[in-house]
């Protein structure tokens, strides 16, 4: 039995399957991952949360990067990897998608229960009063020369609703993700280098509570040694093949 058949069999008998996704699931939608040499992330030193709060110059740098990211994100559409997870949820094979991504593509594809560990790039809010501002309006202000936009309501700094380096993770989302992971019988880690903490601890948590750990990633990860199945191939073709096996369709493109 090849690896994709084995994954399909595990998911078929799963009662509490969970998918955990990283930037690698969105590269097939044209959004570079963290490590891609051309990505916004690798071209720029990230802005630390404390520096964002303290220094206007860092807020200016932050918004320059966000502006570039917006272009990278705005034309992206879900790909067959995102679609496969929608079908697994609809078939009752997974309970939820836990994602490190901020691009909103799981929701666009139609996944219903999506936990965003690192927030979303689709909303902008004031760090002081919490008021949300429309993305287009804030970008227009930046284009008109307001390099570090403040809240028109209370003068606090505006920031995308993403979690920056040094910023606390949303505790409610983390708690829900930890619950799902510790109850999981099959845990699918897709397209994550599994080095960013605390998110990378979730597959370890799932495994230590008895889940079968499946990793699909182009590069090796630090958790490959404890995984039950490791597939080094693209997520889209692999997951489409897995779903077709589960749904009874013949898979012509099996990757082993
Ligand atoms: P990462 O960039 O550290 O790792 C991505 C992994 O995916 C790599 O190991 C790569 O080999 C693999 N990969 C890339 N394309 C693949 C494909 N088609 N099939 C299989 N594997 C593939 O990503 P991470 O672990 O998610 O950590 C990056 C951090 O940066 C996250 O916290 C995330 O919030 C943020 N980020 C998000 C996005 C997004 O929202 N799309 C994009 C870049 C970075």
Image: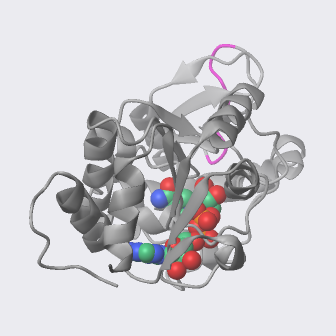
Query: In this picture, which residue range is highlighted in magenta?
Result: 147-153
Depth check, front residue: 107 or 212: 212
Identify which residue is drawn at 74% across, 71% down. Answer: 45
Q: Is residue 30 magenta?
A: no
Residue 99, image x, y percentages: 54, 48
Which picture quadrant has residue 43? bottom right
From this view, report whether residue 103 is shown above or below residue 47: above
User: Could you tell me what secondary structure mostly forms the magenta stretch?
Assistant: loop
Say whether residue 255 is left or right of residue 72: left
Identify which residue is drawn at 27% across, 53% down. Answer: 84
Q: Quadrant of ligand 1?
A: bottom right
Depth check, front residue: 171 or 185: 185
Which picture quadrant has residue 116? top right
From this view, report whether residue 170 is shown above or below residue 63: above
Residue 204, image x, y percentages: 74, 58
Say whether residue 183 is left or right of residue 112: right
Depth check, front residue: 192 or 209: 209
């Amino acid at each position: 039995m090849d690896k994709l058949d084995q994954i399909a069999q595990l998911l078929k008998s799963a009662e509490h399957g969970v998918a955990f996704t990283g930037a690698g699931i969105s590269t097939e939608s044209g959004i570079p991952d963290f490590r891609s040499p051309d990505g916004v992330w690798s071209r720029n030193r990230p802005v630390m949360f404390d520096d964002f709060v303290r220094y206007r110059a860092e807020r200016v740098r932050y918004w320059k990067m966000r502006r570039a990211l917006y272009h990278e994100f705005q034309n992206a559409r879900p790909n067959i990897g995102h679609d496969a997870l929608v079908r697994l949820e609809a078939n009752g094979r997974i309970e939820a998608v836990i994602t490190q991504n901020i691009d909103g593509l799981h929701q666009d594809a139609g996944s219903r229960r999506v936990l965003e560990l690192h927030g979303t790039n689709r909303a902008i809010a004031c760090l002081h009063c919490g008021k949300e501002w429309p993305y287009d309006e804030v970008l227009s202000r930046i284009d008109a020369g307001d390099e570090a936009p403040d809240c028109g309501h209370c003068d606090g700094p505006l920031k995308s609703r993403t979690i920056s380096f040094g910023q606390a993770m949303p505790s409610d989302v983390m708690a829900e993700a930890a619950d799902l992971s510790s109850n999981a019988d099959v845990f699918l880690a897709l397209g994550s280098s599994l080095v960013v903490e605390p998110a990378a601890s979730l597959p370890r948590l799932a495994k230590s509570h008895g889940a079968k750990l499946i990793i699909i990633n182009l590069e090796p990860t630090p958790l490959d040694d404890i995984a039950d199945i490791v597939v080094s191939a693209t997520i889209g073709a692999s997951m489409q093949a897995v779903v077709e096996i589960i749904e009874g369709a013949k898979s012509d493109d099996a990757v082993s």
